[in-house]
């Protein structure tokens, strides 16, 4: 088997994978994006590994673990490999040339018949005019926010007006100037379903601990524990990952007080430190084994 390649933005993101693959010498190569180069003259994309220059087409599989600001380079790489015998994980980089915004995901999920909270999308002015149709309280968020940042709980029309005016008048306070307003799903915690292809690696529950907090983000102090979900919800999570063309996915699910499920988000390159601690799973090794298995098929 030709080796597989895992790319990230910084070496720190690769460290768990390097530690978990010490017995796989020659099978897995690791790189950061600054080692990827493009030769216009030869119309080839290379990896600079020490004194060696490796054609990206020489890898059996490439996992774009973290892309971040290297999105243009990622698109050039996937375009170069589109006619080569190299598998790209995750697949959505080869299908959708976008930056995985929340609104794009919601459209995909809804188109595939998956339950998502009711939502509207647009400028602050538009949200101010029509946000009340979702009912209160509602959630207002920037479409690119992560780890609970740029997320607000809005209790009434006046709060919505003040918040939207803040964004409209505040100039550079909030970027981008597009917003997602969605109905608030009352819950006692979020679930993260970790998916590798067609298999669920495990499930955790994130539960907020601070009184008055509505977000179940670990970065905001939520407690993480191993959990389980009904088979129909697990099936729904797998379908959500497939719908977004994400092979290694962290699917966020919430159950309302009547146990009705909603898909909140499908994360590519999901973080797994909390997941591994809660479940006892060597997640980095499980991902590598999955990637090798895909490459060998």
Image: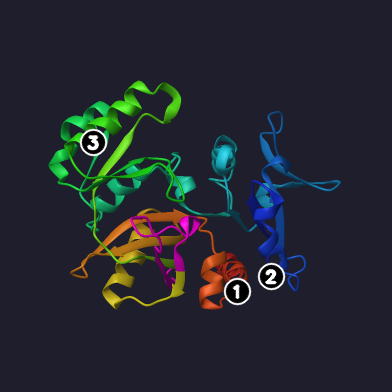
Callout 2: SS:
loop
Residue wearing tag 2: 20
Using a 10 Å C-alpha cutoff, classify the residue at mark 1 as few (fewer than 14 neighbours), some (14 to 19) or many (20 or more): some
Callout 3: SS:
helix
In this view, 206 is above or below 71: below
Residue wearing tag 1: 282
Report the Cα–Cα distance between label 1 and label 2.
Answer: 8 Å
Snapshot quadrant of residue 236: bottom left
The magenta stretch is 197-223
Q: Is residue 124 left or right of residue 51?
A: left
Q: Residue at x 48, y 46 (%)?
A: 94
Q: Is residue 208 left or right of residue 269?
A: left
Res. 209 visible in picture: yes
Pointers 1 and 2 in contact (CB under 8 A)?
Answer: yes
Image quarter (top left, top right, bottom left or bottom right) of the C terminus? bottom right
Report the Cα–Cα distance between label 2 and label 3.
Answer: 48 Å
Residue 248 at x, y = what percent?
49, 61
Using a 10 Å C-alpha cutoff, classify the residue at mark 3 as few (fewer than 14 neighbours), some (14 to 19) or many (20 or more): many
Image quarter (top left, top right, bottom left or bottom right) of the N terminus? bottom right
Residue 181 at x, y = what percent?
26, 42
Q: Residue at x 71, y 63 (%)?
A: 18
Residue wearing tag 3: 160
Residue situated in front as seen by the camera: 174 or 32: 174
Between disc 1 and disc 3, whose residue precedes?
A: 3
């Amino acid at each position: 088997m030709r080796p597989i390649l895992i790319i990230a933005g910084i070496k720190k993101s690769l460290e768990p994978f390097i530690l978990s693959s010490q017995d796989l010498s020659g099978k897995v190569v690791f790189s950061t994006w600054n080692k990827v180069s493009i030769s216009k003259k030869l119309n080839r994309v290379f990896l600079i590994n020490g004194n060696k220059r490796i054609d990206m087409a020489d890898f059996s599989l490439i996992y774009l673990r973290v892309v971040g600001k290297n999105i243009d380079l990622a698109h050039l790489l996937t375009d170069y490999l589109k006619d080569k015998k190299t598998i790209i994980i995750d697949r959505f980089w080869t299908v959708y040339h976008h930056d995985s915004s929340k609104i794009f995901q919601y459209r995909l999920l809804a188109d595939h018949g998956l339950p998502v909270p009711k939502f509207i999308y647009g400028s602050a002015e538009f949200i101010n005019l029509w946000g009340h149709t979702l009912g209160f309280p509602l959630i207002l968020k920037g479409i690119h926010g992560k780890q609970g940042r740029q997320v607000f709980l809005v209790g009434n029309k006046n709060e919505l007006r003040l918040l939207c005016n803040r964004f409209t008048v505040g100039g550079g306070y909030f970027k981008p100037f597009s917003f997602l307003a969605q109905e608030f799903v009352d819950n006692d915690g979020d679930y993260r379903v970790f998916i590798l292809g067609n298999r669920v690696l495990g499930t955790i529950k994130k539960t907020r601990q601070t009184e008055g907090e509505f977000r179940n983000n670990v970065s905001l102090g939520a407690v993480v524990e191993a959990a389980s979900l009904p088979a129909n919800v697990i099936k729904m999570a797998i379908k959500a990952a497939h719908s977004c063309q994400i092979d290694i996915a962290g699917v966020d699910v919430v159950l309302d007080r009547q146990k009705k499920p909603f898909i909140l988000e499908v994360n590519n390159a999901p973080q797994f430190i909390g997941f591994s601690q809660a479940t006892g799973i060597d997640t980095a090794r499980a991902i590598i084994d999955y990637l090798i298995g895909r490459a060998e098929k």
